[in-house]
Amino acid sequence: MSLTLQPMTDEYFATWNERLVVEYAREKVEAGVWTEEHALQLSRKEQAETLPDGRRTTGHELFVGVVDDDVVGNLWLFTDPELPVPSTYIYDIEILESHRGKGLGRALLGAAEAWSAEHGSASVRLNVFAPNTTARALYESAGYQLTSMHMMKRIPSA
């Protein structure tokens, strides 16, 4: 079973983008960063700012992971053309639920790393929310190291 990357189509992008906005809002609420009341609006705003030209936004590469002609996951990479030493950032990496537990997350991560190497990146970076212990374990086992940490303490209302 070999995983390959293929560019997202416009139709796939539209569906994926809407789902990603909802999922990102949920993750921000779960992490305690945003309130549920404003999360969807904030997520839409952030996504529109990050991808102003949709899947054709400069520096961003949007792929589907494919195995045996079946889409098994999604991958969103960004390489900042302004950096003196290129580094690729994984904005989103996901194996679709029906394909999880088969080693495809590691294969998609490997495909991201291979793409990055082929395009001259010196490193691959990503963010993972603290509650996502499955993803954190995958990244750590694949050699990713902690480079920074955001911390928060809730302050009770006066």
Image (cartoon, rainbow, N blue to C red):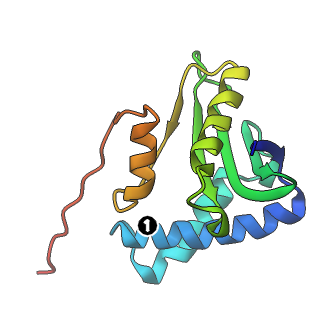
Determine the residue positioned at 64% across, 24% down. 82
What residue is disc 1 on?
28
**In the displayed structure, would residue 24 be above or below residue 57?**
below
State the image quarter where residue 96 is shown.
bottom right
Determine the residue positioned at 79% across, 42% down. 4
Where does the image place residue 114, in percent across and percent down from the top left?
Answer: 67, 28
- Residue that lies at the very extreme toward the bottom in this rendered image: 37
Which quarter shows the C terminus?
A: bottom left
Where does the image place residue 5, in percent across and percent down from the top left?
Answer: 78, 42
**In the displayed structure, would residue 23 be above or below residue 105?**
below
Query: Does residue 32 appear in this view?
Result: yes
- Residue that lies at the very extreme toward the front in this rendered image: 1
Provide the secondary structure element on which disc 1 rests: helix
Name the amino acid type tagged 1: Lys
**In the displayed structure, would residue 142 be above or below residue 129?**
above
Looking at this view, is 52 or 30 the one in front? 30
Determine the residue positioned at 77% across, 70% down. 15
